[in-house]
Every structure is written in C-alpha cells, then in structure tokens.
Image (cartoon, rainbow, N blue to C red):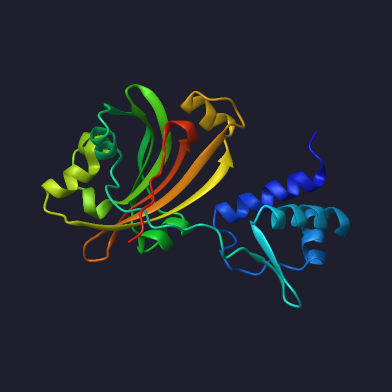
Amino acid sequence: MLPAYVKIHDQIKKDIDEGIWEIGERLPSERDLAETFEVSRMTLRQAITLLVEEGVLERRVGSGTYVASTRVQEKMRGTTSFTEIMKSQGKIPSSQLISYRRTLPSEREVEKLGIHKTENIIRMERVRYADDIPVVYEVASIPEKFIKNFKKEEVTSHFFQTLQEHGYKIGKSQQTIYARLAKEKIAKYLGIPRGHAILGLTQVSYFDDGTAFEYVKSQYVGERFEFYLENK
C-alpha cells in the first residue's frame, strides 16, 4: 500500500496535468491542503517537498507554493496530423475507433474550443497505430458545426485531409506535453503494463483565422514515439 504522502503527491500532480491548477498558480496553504486530504501537515509537507524536488512546484519565500513556471512548454513546429507524420516516416498509419458520439461539451472543451456550452460536439475515442503497433490513445473533441456534412469515415480516418478538401485552411496548433503513468484502461489499449511511463499531450488546433476546430488529449507510449522540438 502506498504511503499517504505518495498518494497526495500523485493526486496533486494529476490535478496539475489536467489543468485544475494552472502553471504559475498559487496553491492553497499547507494547512488548508492538509485538511483537504485529511492528513497531518507533516505528511502534506512531505508530498509538497517531493514535488518541489521534481520541479513540479516551486516555493517562493514569504509568498507560498506555486505550480512551477519553468515546466517545458515548447512549441512544436511542422505537421500536426498523426496520419501525415506516420506517412512521412515511411510507416503505415491506422486507427481503431472505440467510440464516436454527439454530445454537449464539458467545461474544459468549452474553454479550449471557444464554443458555447449548448453547442454540440463530436467526441471520438480511438487508438492510433504505426505498422500495426499501437502508439497513442486519444480522445478528440470537434465542434459539430464544422463536420455536420462529413461522413463519419472521413472524420475518423483522415480528418485533416477532409477539412482541407472541403476548403478549410489549417493554421497553428498549441501543445502541452507532460509525463504520467498508464492506467489500466489505457495500458490495455496500448499493449503495455499498467503503470508504464507514457507521454501525455493536449493539443488545440486552429484554422488560419484563429478559430479552434479540434481539442485532443493523447497518451503516447514513450519508447514508440519521439517528439521533435524546433525553435527558430
């Protein structure tokens, strides 16, 4: 059984990765956090100290504890389509569609896509393969208004290509990368052990006029995919 401070460490890190606490945001006081987690301040302090040592949090004298502003947020340049990336490396891309449904957006999807909470989205869950080897599990959220006239297969198999064929011009994308451990569900889809190290990526893609058209949360098998960062 994991020590209490390790569980707290993991929960705080998870909350940061999921954007509950943003980069540069001040955390509640140790007293308040200890009450929230129902542990002693000494146990809470052990978890905070470990996160500080890992560079996830930073202490500021006389001010408090903050989500570290030094976490890497590099801008990745180049193709953002998984299909095109795989083809450019001489690999055969394919996908396994797990779910595809029309639904109302979550608060996070409303924020990332810049849409109203009453606007429908298409949320699709799938596993992406390179030469039949699972590389990434992803959940993509797309405003329905952009794809209501598309066939389902056009969206699930070659979405970016379909957009361009219908006259849309794809612009920039913004990505955030973070490390995490694979949960049982994800591990099963990716063919790896539970708790295996993976790379998480959140990406918002935009048309050239700045309109967001896709929000994707992906989990990559680290040794099967390499992110290349390029700065001008």
The image shows residue 142, relative to residue 98, as above or below, that is below
- As rendered, which of 146 and 76 lies closer to the eye? 76
In the displayed structure image, the side of residue 38 where residue 64 appears, left or right: left
Percent position of residue 83, x then y: 26, 36
- As rendered, which of 229 and 186 lies closer to the eye? 229
Locate residue 183: give its quadrant.
Answer: top right
| The N terminus sits in image quarter | top right
| The C terminus sits in image quarter | bottom left
How many numbered tags mark residues here?
Answer: 0
Q: Farthest front residue? A: 232
The residue sitting at 34% across, 21% down in the picture is 132
Residue 153 in view: yes
Residue 40 in view: no
The image shows residue 12, relative to residue 4, as above or below, that is below
Percent position of residue 204, x then y: 36, 55
The residue sitting at 43% across, 31% down in the picture is 224
The image shows residue 121, relative to residue 210, as above or below, that is above
The residue sitting at 77% across, 61% down in the picture is 33
Percent position of residue 36, x then y: 77, 58
- As rendered, which of 141 and 225 lies closer to the eye? 225
The image shows residue 191, relative to residue 165, as above or below, that is above
The residue sitting at 53% across, 37% down in the picture is 198
